Amino acid sequence: MKIEAIIWDLDGVLIDSEEYHIEAEVETLKKFGIELSLPVAKEYFGVKLEDYFSGIVKRYKINIPVHRMITQHYNTLIGYYRKIFPVTPGVFEVLGELQKRYRMGIATSREKELADIALKRFSLFEFFETIVYGEDVQNGKPDPEPFLMACGRLNTKPHLCIVVEDSVSGVAAAKKAGMRSIVRKACHNIDLDFTKADYMITDLSEIPPLLQKMEQNG
């Protein structure tokens, strides 16, 4: 099996942020009188802010402008990206090793300003040839557009790409794009259904030998 490129999600994969994202969402929604539960929060892993808060407004039948909620949450997230979200263990070693063998890009639902705060903070830009941000696409995950755009920029074909994800919507997007997916299982997504994923790991250090085995086995 030939592999030319790896396309990474950002939140929950490269930065270990998803549980903190829920804290930020709870913090924001409390200001609008909404008590967000953990199961509901997990349903929205991996989606764009506009889709997230549009869904919340419809779900709770509230008469609050979506853009107002987004602005409030955006300001909350800036602080989290600057100071709170940690990098995922093993990121630098794994990316450094894989960079020698594959072309790599990021396809994230996160807005450029926010994503770049984390990428700059942890000096991650050097590992990637391209980054597809939330505002780069018309349709976010689970639509395949983010992954297909990254694939095009990497000048390769979907069946030669591996996606590393942590959300159900990301796995669905990868599948629709004709790409194989590796899911990073962690505390924040341990109870989600990833039966459509091709492979599952719990530590990023598992990825290099897994890819090598995939290529050897054809």
Image: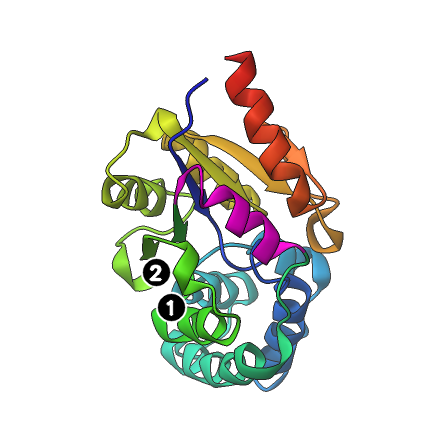
Q: Position of residue 116 (x, y in %)?
A: 40, 72
The residue located at (43%, 69%) in the rendering is 115
Q: Which residue is mark 2?
A: 133
User: Which label's residue is closer to the chain start, 2 or 1?
Assistant: 1
Which residue is the extreme one toward the top?
Answer: 218
Type of amino acid at the residue the image marks with label 1: Glu
- Locate residue 174: give its quadrant: top left
Kind of element beneath mark 2: loop
Whether residue 196 can be seen here: no
Q: Is residue 58 magenta?
A: no
> Residue 104 in the image: x percent, y percent?
40, 46
Whole-percent x, y for residue 107 in the image: 39, 51
Image x and y of residue 102, in percent:
41, 38
Residue stretch rendered in magenta on the structure: 90-103
- Which residue lies under the disc numbered 1? 111
Residue at 71% in and 61% down? 38
The answer to whether residue 133 is left or right of residue 11 is left
In the rendered structure, which amino acid carries the disc numbered 2? Answer: Tyr
**Quarter-of-image position of residue 199:** top right
Discs 2, 1 touching: Cβ within 8 Å: yes
Residue 54 or residue 16, whichever sits in front: 16
